[in-house]
Amino acid sequence: MKTVCVVTGARSEYGLIRLLLKEISSSKKINLQLIVTGSHLSQKYGFTYKEIEADSFQIDWKVHFLDGENDPISLTKAMGKALAGFADAYAALKPDIVILVGDRYEILMAAIAAMMASIPIAHIHGGETTEGAIDEAIRHFITKMAHLHFVATEEYKKRVVQLGEDIGRIYLVGGLGVDSIKKIKLIAKDELEKKIDFKFGWRNLLVTFHPVTLQSESIEYQIDELLGALATLNETRIIFTMPNADSQSDFIRNRLDEFASTRANVKIYESLGQLKYLSIIPFVDAVIGNSSSGLLEVPSFKKPTINIGSRQNGRLKASSVIDCSAERRSILKAIQFVYSSQFQDTLKSTINPYGNGGASKLIKEILENINFDSLLIKRFNDISFEYIGAN
């Protein structure tokens, strides 16, 4: 039986792979191993590994490396600790292949350790671009170390080919986030309000804002502009989810706590979990911020997304996504547009560019039928270019 090891380091990416884990664990041809790391193991970020255990998944190894601080120097040092931890994990578990999702720094360490241990890597959601974040470079870095690629769209497949990967090892499966929406049973409104201790009002917004690591404007300016815009919406109920464990996220967390402390219409959650988060979306007027969820998942609900700033620049976007700058006038203009009849009339025809679901089952079937033994040797796939104006 093949042994497939999946790594998860954050609540956001666990929500994407939850159904994939269920598919793999139900397979008669695959033995699932699970490594949990990153903010899952931090009290500061809600000990979200408990959600994984509550879903009845066995955690085979925990890689602890976060020490509390999230400035660039502290995170760089923590990454070295993570690399050593993954080396120990792979030596003990001896998987046949490692599955990695996305573009976070802990996933990069998991990839490097697997590469040095000569363990094949399967990468999910490669080929995407996020021009405003360091994740952009990390994602492509992992693509070059990976041996199998499961991509969400045809455009992203072409980009992985452009990076020199063998087209025969690239599988177009669609977005993992859509799977959850199609298969999960959402919580009814009354029950949801009790579970999250929140009463939906006449108007409601769901907000998540992460640091934008490569943008020239300071994070202080961006979050103050966002909060300045939201401060004018006294009759709107606002739900915030805290940012990921990224560099500069502590400043955002502190500003959100200050903002909510004086406003009865605002509530903050460290981690809602996938079920509660998805269940909230049908009852809000829009999702606001710069999280990938606003692009990957929210369009399937035919709900608006206000995408702030450059963090998600380059990603495919549904017609329900409204882009705006990280300035309060631009944000307020986007919020006003959400409620316009002109925009509301277009929502019913929203098509999510990340597909209609089925990615988890398709990935499982590919893993069941592929020969891992031949994956380690990679050939760089040269493509032809026409050099216009070359000397």
Image: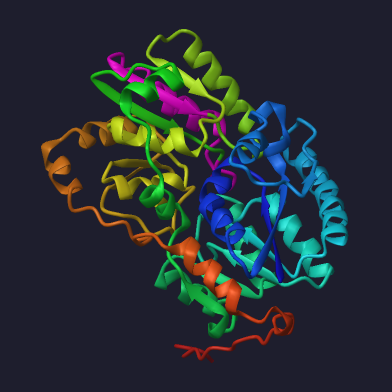
Compared with 384, 346 (above or below) is above
Report x, y in % for residue 351: 26, 57
Residue segment shown in magenta: 212-241
Task: Please indicate, yes or no, whether residue 82 appears anywhere in the rendered image.
Answer: yes
Which residue is nearer to you in this view: 334 or 193? 193
For the point 43% across and 58% down, which residue is it? 315
Which residue is nearer to you in this view: 62 or 346? 62
In this picture, residue 357 sits left or right of residue 118: left
Report x, y in % for residue 355: 35, 62
For the point 54% across and 49% down, which residue is it? 18
For the point 51% across and 30% down, which residue is it? 272
Q: How many marks?
A: 0
Compared with 11, 175 (above or below) is below
Report x, y in % for residue 155: 41, 71
Report x, y in % for residue 114: 78, 65
Task: Please indicate, yes or no, whether residue 295 appears anywhere in the rendered image.
Answer: no
In this picture, residue 86 sits left or right of residue 176: right
Is 219 magenta? The answer is yes
| Residue farthest along the front direction in this orientation | 28
Q: Quadrant of the C terminus?
A: bottom right
Which residue is nearer to you in this view: 321 or 311? 321
Compared with 308, 99 (above or below) is below
